[in-house]
Amino acid sequence: MNAAAPDSQPARVKRRRIGGRTPFHWAMFQLHWAFGISIGLVLAVMGVTGSIMAFEDQIMEASSFGIVNVEPKPAPVLSPDHLLDAFAAQIPGAKPTSLTLRTRPGASPQVTFAPPVAAGATKPSAQKLYLDPYSGRILGHARGEQFFATVRRLHRFLLLPGGAKGAGRQITGIAAISLLGFLLSGLYLRWPRRPLNWRLWLKPHLNARGRGLYLTLHQVIGTWVLPVYLVAALTGLTYSYPWYKAGFDFVLTGKSTVADEAEPAPAKSKDRASGKAAPGHPAARLDTAWRATLRENGGPTTIIITLPKSAKAPVRVRYLLPTAGNERAFNELSIDGETGEIRDRDLFARNSLGERMASARLAVHRGTFFGLPFAILFMLAAALMPLFPITGYLLYFNRRAAARRTASSRNRQM
């Protein structure tokens, strides 16, 4: 027994050196790599797809001239009511839910609608089509729209059946929670003895080879992107768990609201579905709300009108100003469709920082909330996500190979 003691002590010391200086450090290390080599692949997919979607609107608009934009004409553009009447005549039975208009010359309006459903058929998902602003003729989908829709489903649901109600949403939610764990455990594991020395944190050793190179890429670049991943994980979780979304809103605004991810219910209008206009029906009131919105200070550049559910319901309008800092900085109006009276006005710029972040959480998630340089930074950080499972795997295989060599050497000595 006494002869075995000297051999066991170095073994315990060596085991601790693999994971760190304390048993807790060793345990954190084991959890970090064990979850990393499993959940890391999911995060890599989410990161790459997120970077692809970073500038999807700009890509689709640039590649879709003649659809998203048309050649400007001296003729006046159609009003919302006339646009929807023209649309209803082309797709009878379709039920519009919202209409997006842009004031730039030649910009095509976009209608969101529930397609006609045959008796006994499954209810299809909402669709969007662009219309000619001067004639109301259907121009079609933006080029790349289907591609980005698939990328979005891969990003959020891993293309698994069930969509938002399936297993994919739970897996990506668990991955986002795991990302928070990786960030905190990784920060703990690499905490240097001189934490105020910025070079230890931020300067990679690119002249290293093998394990040293893998480690410096994993640790140093991980430190670079840590703030971005922290923001992305904290905001991304709001799309996975309603209870988390409620807490997220409460922390930022002091009140809890559950976001409605679904498309608004279509207006109940048999006349609109058949392409006939009738005085007093809900869709006929959009022109009044539209004109009231155009009179808002600053001159709206984008207007999104949600069709009311009933003739007496106010019209909900969201709009962006030229000075909007991001694509989600919407001002919101509640307008009497008959008189054009604005019953309620919620201006984005007058809200607190927390309220702006809560209402524009997608812009925060993408980085556009903080400006174009940060949007590019977030895109690049997302594209780098596969680096961490790759270097993690390389380090794992390197440790396994080193352990086999050590065991083989010990066996030869025996």
Image (cartoon, rainbow, N blue to C red):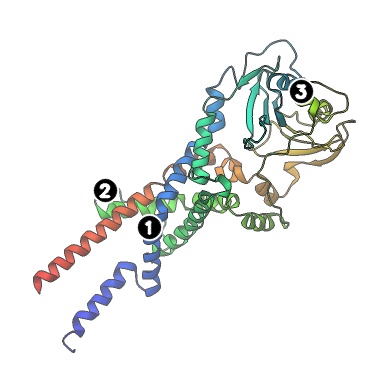
CA gap between label 1 and label 2 equals: 15 Å
Q: Nearer the viewer, residue 188 or 57?
A: 57
* Residue 269 x/y as whole percent: 80, 30
Amino acid type shown at disc 1: Leu
**Quick one: which residue is furthest to the right in this view?**
339
Q: Is residue 303 visible?
A: no
Would you place residue 161 above or below residue 174 in this image? above
Q: Amino acid at mark 2?
A: Asn
Q: Residues within 10 Å of mark 2 (few under 14, many from 20)?
A: few
Q: Residue furthest bottom?
A: 2
Say if mark 1 contacts mark 3, CB within 8 Å.
no
- Amino acid type assigned to the residue bearing label 3 in the image: Ser
- Figure quadrant of the N terminus: bottom left
User: Image point 24% across, 52% down: which residue?
Assistant: 210
Q: Give the residue drawn at x 72%, y 30%.
A: 95
Read off the residue under disc 1.
Answer: 200
**Among the 4 quarters of the image, the one containing residue 266:** top right
